[in-house]
Amino acid sequence: MREDILTVMWKESKGLLRYSSSRWKEIVTLLAPIALFGVIFPIQFRITWLTSGWSVAVSFITPLMLIASTIAESFAGERERHTLETLLASRLPDRAILFGKLFVSIIFGWGMTLFLLLVSLVVVNLMEWNGRFQIYQPDILWINLSASLLMSGMVASLGILISLRSPTVQSAAQTIMLMLFLPAMLLQAVVFLLPTFLPRETVRAFLDRMDLISITSVFLVLLLAITIGLFLGAIARFRRAILISL
Amino acid sequence: MAKNAICIENLTKEFDSVRALDGLALEVPAGMIFGFLGPNGAGKTTTIRLLLGLLEPSSGYAKVLGFDIRTQADRIRAQTGALLEHTGIYEQMTAEDNLDFYGRVFQMPTTERKARIQELLTHMDLWDRRKDRARNWSRGMKQKLAVARTLLHRPSLILMDEPTAGLDVQAAVAIREDLEALASREKVTIFLTTHNMADAEKLCHQVAVIREGRLVEIGSPDDLRARVGSPRLEITGRKFTDQSLKLLQTHPQVSSVRTQNSHLVIDLLPQTDVADLVSSLVSTGAQVEEVRRGIASLEEVFLTLTGAQDA
């Protein structure tokens, strides 16, 4: 099984970012987050980048941006380009195909986020050099590592789950975007509407008790539960007969 | 290997209210090239998908290489090469990477894999283009690459769905010749679906004709022609008048007469006395230069069996 997963990962890595219509689009997909979150933001925030929650926001957003733009290809792309049936007619076990595609996306999203955090660290040190190399605060570093990994896992699992049953890449991409941004918009609406239903003092007291670590930890646990659910859902939905007849 | 590479018994597949395959039963002996003929929508592709375990049958039973399609599909896929309706080539990858991927999928050791890729690409005249991305290739080249991929892991059985569909004449002939040479060299069983009668006639040791999901006939192309097609007479000559044609049309042993280019084509009933027929023709003043006995082509047999001539 391990060899089969690695084989699928090898193939996926050969095709990653090569489906877009132009080379420029590929380069922009990769360079845009690095330029924005790895260079411009750290220049803006300077040393607070290493001690505040700004880098944590980047750890959530970057995998979402990168994986959401590529994961629709995983199955819907194979279906659209008529390579899926041949792949399914090979000896590869279901889970090797599924995990191979999933792991490549997670490694891509997580790896790029870690690279970006490293670039931003170098940029902050160049801006704020005081004779020694400064690093992220330990709790911020831990949150960054786990948030980017879990976010990568969640977006990749959701993307795979949707792409499995989508007839085209476009429809997969649209559904993925909807599923990712709808909960975020709902959450935002709740945050805005909360003070109108609850006394202002109650809300303030609640927020005062919550620090970055607590809020993020709750969020990470929630993310872990969602990721596991989506992952199990993808395994359950992988049926060769249904994948072919779509 | 089992005596029969494929053994199908009463296999049925229904999609909602549509019965794509209706009680199909046939056996494909190991080591032969078997043609599965039928018009569009006859159930050919469904049969291949069922044999590979990509679809589950509604009822019935089939064994491929001795393995049950319901419970041992993974073992079937491990020992089978499949060239399906589409080539399945990854166009963003090079030709070499396409084969390398499937070599890894079928767990070929690196040295053997590299040597086999070189052997097949050389045989297919694609070795010099191995570093090209397949997206820039013609349909014929992609099809050749797909054939190479199908043979890569030396499968015991190859399932091919319309291997020459959409190809120009030269590419189709090249693929056919490659298949024939490779089949005899590699000693594999090839099960191919087609509605190209030239493929079936030149390539297949045995053919089965399917219509609306049911088996209509099975046998060698010669057997089918002899069984289903009527004997035929082709007469070259001059002065074939209306009187000559009328006489032939009313002859009790003649089923039809037509002129084709400058000769007469006469479809006969079995055991017709040809000498008597020719004498009658000559008596009308016709000058006969050559008389040739023939038999219906596989295409005509196919049209008869699939009912296309009724339409």
Image: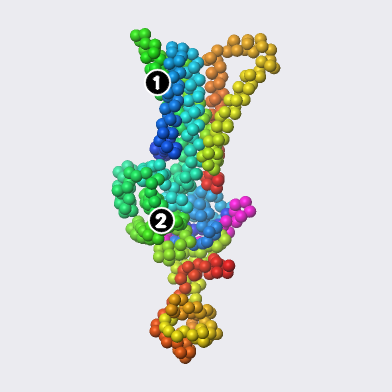
- Return the x and y of residue A71 as percentages of the image width and height: 49, 35
Examine the residues drawn in magenta and state their main secondary structure: strand
Q: Chain of mark 2?
A: B
Q: Is residue B62 visible?
A: no
**Rendered position, B200 above or below A128:** below
Which numbered tag is attached to residue B69? none
Magenta stretch, residue numbers: B14-33
- Tell me the quarter of the picture where residue A50 sits: top left
- Residue B30 in magenta stretch: yes
Q: Considering depth in this image, is A196 or B71 the residue closer to the camera?
A: A196
Q: Residue at x 53, y 14 (%)?
A: A212
Q: Does residue A221 show up?
A: yes
For the point 41% across and 33% down, the residue is A24
Question: Is A49 placed above or below A66 here?
Answer: above
Residue A201's spot in the image, x, y percent?
A: 66, 10
Decide if residue A33 is on the left or right side of residue B187. Answer: right
Question: Which residue shows up at 68% across the image and 16% down it?
Answer: A196
Here the colouring is rainbow
How many labels sit on residues?
2
Whole-percent x and y of residue A14?
A: 39, 38
Specify the label residue A119 is tagged with.
Answer: 1
**Residue assigned mark 2:** B1
Disc 2 packing (10 Å; few <14; some 14–19; many ≥20) = few
Image location of residue B278, percent across then percent down: 45, 86
Q: Amino acid at mark 1?
A: Val
Q: Amino acid at mark 2?
A: Met
Q: Secondary structure at mark 1?
A: helix
Badge 2 and badge 1 both on one subunit:
no
Q: Distance of mark 2 from mark 1, alpha carbons?
A: 60 Å
